[in-house]
Amino acid sequence: MRHSRRTIKLGRKAEHRNLMLANQVCSLIEHQRIRTTLAKAKAARPIAEKMLTLAKRGDIHARRLAFAYLHQKSAVQKLFAEVGPRSANRSGGYCRIVKLGFRQSDASPMAYLELVDLAVVEETPQTPNKPTKPQKPAN
């Protein structure tokens, strides 16, 4: 019986699975949202939340633990500098899974895995400086 066995195997060996999920978490940290299959999103979410919990701690040991799992220095730096402090007042539930439907090629269920506290980038609409046409005088 499979009591208390939570590992989602995803049809891969352990080393391949761990590296793939680490890469997905790094992409999530970099882009704030990734599009992946539903099974991979469900497998990557607990790992991403553990990394965000480490980032909230912010000490050197937490940084070393995060680097030991993620293996990407730039992702760890962004995690501890930007993403972690943004989630400091949240006590859990840093990621959400949004279902998208089925992929057309093989009908796999697709989903977005995204951070709840997305970095909001406000873009002000810029009006281009077009030269105005000279108006003709009314006769």
Image (spheres, rainbow, N blue to C red):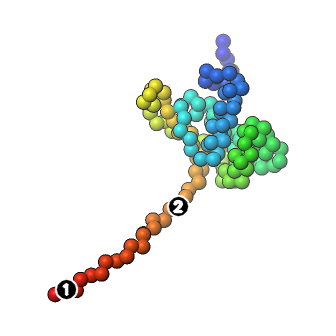
Of 17 and 138, nearer the camera is 138
Q: For residue 61, what is the image quadrant?
A: top right
Report whether residue 53 is seen.
Answer: no
Q: Mark 2 points at which residue?
A: 122
Tell me residue 67's x, y (percent).
77, 41
Marks counted in the figure total 2
The residue positioned farthest toward the left in the image shown? 139
Q: Which amino acid does label 2 sit on?
A: Glu
Q: Residue at x 46, y 36 (%)?
A: 100
Name the secondary structure under disc 2. Answer: loop
Quarter placement of the C terminus: bottom left
Q: Mark 1 points at which residue?
A: 138
Q: Residue at x 67, y 17 (%)?
A: 3
Tell me residue 8's x, y (percent).
63, 24
Quarter placement of the N terminus: top right
Of 55 and 31, nearer the camera is 31
Residue 135 left/right relative to 52: left
Q: For residue 129, what is the image quadrant?
A: bottom left
Tell me residue 73's x, y (percent).
74, 46
Name the secondary structure under disc 1. Answer: loop
Tell me residue 40's x, y (percent).
59, 31
- Residue 93 numbered mark, or none: none
Q: Which of marks 2 and 1 is nearer the N terminus?
A: 2
Q: Are marks 2 and 1 in contact (CB under 8 Å)?
A: no
